[in-house]
Image (cartoon, rainbow, N blue to C red):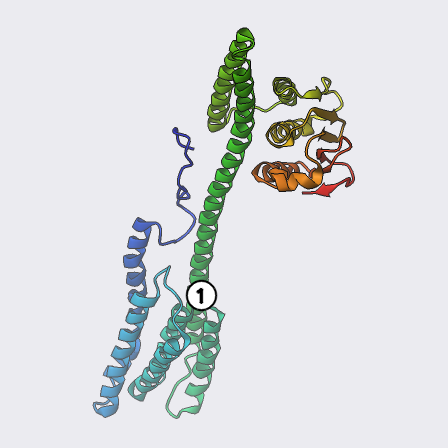
């Protein structure tokens, strides 16, 4: 909350949990470091390059050298364009095309490099993970392992290179684990951002509800007293002056309430609200039966009942045109009855579900209670907040 009483904009969550692109320095650093670390792996393609280079000169040697070079170029493209921590998965047709080209290049490299050319399968497996970024990419590893174990044993002149299986497994699992970790960190960061936004929205709703509850009640009482003072002006000047002074005091109290709410220090007490209700009803000329003892009410319900008294008092003064009000308290229930507009006409008159009752209902739900409204025994409107079994129309 800012000092002028307005809600602050959502704050960016603390850094340190994810590789999210909303951290500019980290994102810029990884755009450089990630590709560099990936391209360094190309040094392992020197082995099939050297094997092809040492082969007998001819078309097969040239094709193998070109295939190794193109495989290195394609892997470098994947690393620089698709391996960023926050890159999106590549569409399956495009990923399949790239992997198909890489497999063809591995096959061409074996023309002169023979079994050593199968080293390129490690790069195909890693490329699949960077392109697809989901468990489907792991299917490339078993296929590569099968080729490494079978082809050297069936192609004349080739020697088994079973040690390459370890490279395929380690490279595939390491890169897949890294990409999954990055993805989880991004999801965690996104969840934190969403929680921060929701927290701000909930705080704004709370402030709006409190502003309505505080100012709605205070301004209603001020309006009643000001109207009374205007009627007494020519009849009883001293009484009118006293009412005006009370209006002034109420206005100051309302301002203090707003400031306290903004500062988060405002306290609403049941005793204070009952005393304020009695004073407001007296000023409006309404006969009020308001309890003075609060011993029966448990502590955890007193704040909720205080807000209910404030809302009920405001409703009676605004809408009821009542001459009598009865407030009753028990260990689990607060009831406010009046003899004004009845429960059916009340909704049409504007005493149905509104901002105040909606806010009170939300407070009641959090306290494990509920709000009930309808026709009361005095012939008018009843507002009931209770934790007891259902006894009326529940909101």
**114 lies left or right of 378:** left
Q: Residue furthest front?
A: 234
**Camera sees residue 116:** no
**Can residue 174 be seen?**
yes
Image vertical order of residue 195 relative to residue 266, above or below:
below
Residue 268, given in percent of the width and then of the height, sits at: 59, 24
Residue 203 left/right relative to 269: left
> Which quarter of the rendered picture does the C terminus lie within?
top right
Residue 55, position as x, y percentages in the image: 25, 87
Judge from the rendering whether residue 11 lies leftward or rightward of residue 308; answer left or right.
left
Q: What element carries label 1?
A: helix
Q: Residues within 10 Å of mark 1 (few under 14, many from 20)?
A: many
Q: Quadrant of the N terminus?
A: top left
Q: In this view, does 35 lie above or below 15?
A: below
Frontmost residue, 217 versus 196: 217
Residue 138 position (above or below residue 339): below
Report the front residue among 56 and 325: 325
- The answer to which image quadrant residue 298 occupies is top right
Kindly identify the residue that appears in the image at 49 percent across and 70 percent down: 135
Q: Which residue is drawn at 74% across and 37% down?
A: 375
Viewer-closest of 301 and 355: 355
Q: Quadrant of residue 305?
A: top right
Q: Identify residue for label 1.
A: 176
Q: Residue furthest left?
A: 57
């Amino acid at each position: 909350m800012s000092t002028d009483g307005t809600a602050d904009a959502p704050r960016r969550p603390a850094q340190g949990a994810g590789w999210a692109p909303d951290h500019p320095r980290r994102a810029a650093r990884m755009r450089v470091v990630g590709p560099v670390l990936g391209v360094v792996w190309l040094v392992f393609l020197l082995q099939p390059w050297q094997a092809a280079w040492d082969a007998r000169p001819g078309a097969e040697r040239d094709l193998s050298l070109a295939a190794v070079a193109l495989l290195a170029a394609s892997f470098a493209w994947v690393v620089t364009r698709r391996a960023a921590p926050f890159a999106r998965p590549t569409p399956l047709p495009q990923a399949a095309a790239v992997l198909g080209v890489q497999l063809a290049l591995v096959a061409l490299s074996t023309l002169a490099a023979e079994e050593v050319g199968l080293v390129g399968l490690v790069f195909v497996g890693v490329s699949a993970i960077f392109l697809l970024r989901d468990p489907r990419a792991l299917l490339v590893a078993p296929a590569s392992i099968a080729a490494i174990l079978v082809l050297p044993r069936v192609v004349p002149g080739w020697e088994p290179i079973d040690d390459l299986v370890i490279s395929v497994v380690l490279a595939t699992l390491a890169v897949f684990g890294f990409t999954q970790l990055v993805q989880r960190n991004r999801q965690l960061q996104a969840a934190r951002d969403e929680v921060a936004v929701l927290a701000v929205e909930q705080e704004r709703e709370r402030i709006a509800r409190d502003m309505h509850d505080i100012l709605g009640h205070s301004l209603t009482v001020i309006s009643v007293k000001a109207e009374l003072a205007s009627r007494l002006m020519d009849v009883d000047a001293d009484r009118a002056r006293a009412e005006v002074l009370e209006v002034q005091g109420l206005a100051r109290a309302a301002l203090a309430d707003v400031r306290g709410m903004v500062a988060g220090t405002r306290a609403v007490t049941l005793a204070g609200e009952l005393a304020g209700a009695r004073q407001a009803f007296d000023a409006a000329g309404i006969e009020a039966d308001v309890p003075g003892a609060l011993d029966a009410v448990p502590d955890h319900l007193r704040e909720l009942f205080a807000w209910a008294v404030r809302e009920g008092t405001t409703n009676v003064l605004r809408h009821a045109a009542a001459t009598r009000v009865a407030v009753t308290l028990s260990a689990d229930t607060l009831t406010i009855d009046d003899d004004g507009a009845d429960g059916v006409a009340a909704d049409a008159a504007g005493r149905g579900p509104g901002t105040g009752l909606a806010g009170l209902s939300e407070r009641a739900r959090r306290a494990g209670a509920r709000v009930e409204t309808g026709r009361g025994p005095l012939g008018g409107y009843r507002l009931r907040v209770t934790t007891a079994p259902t006894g009326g129309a529940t909101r």
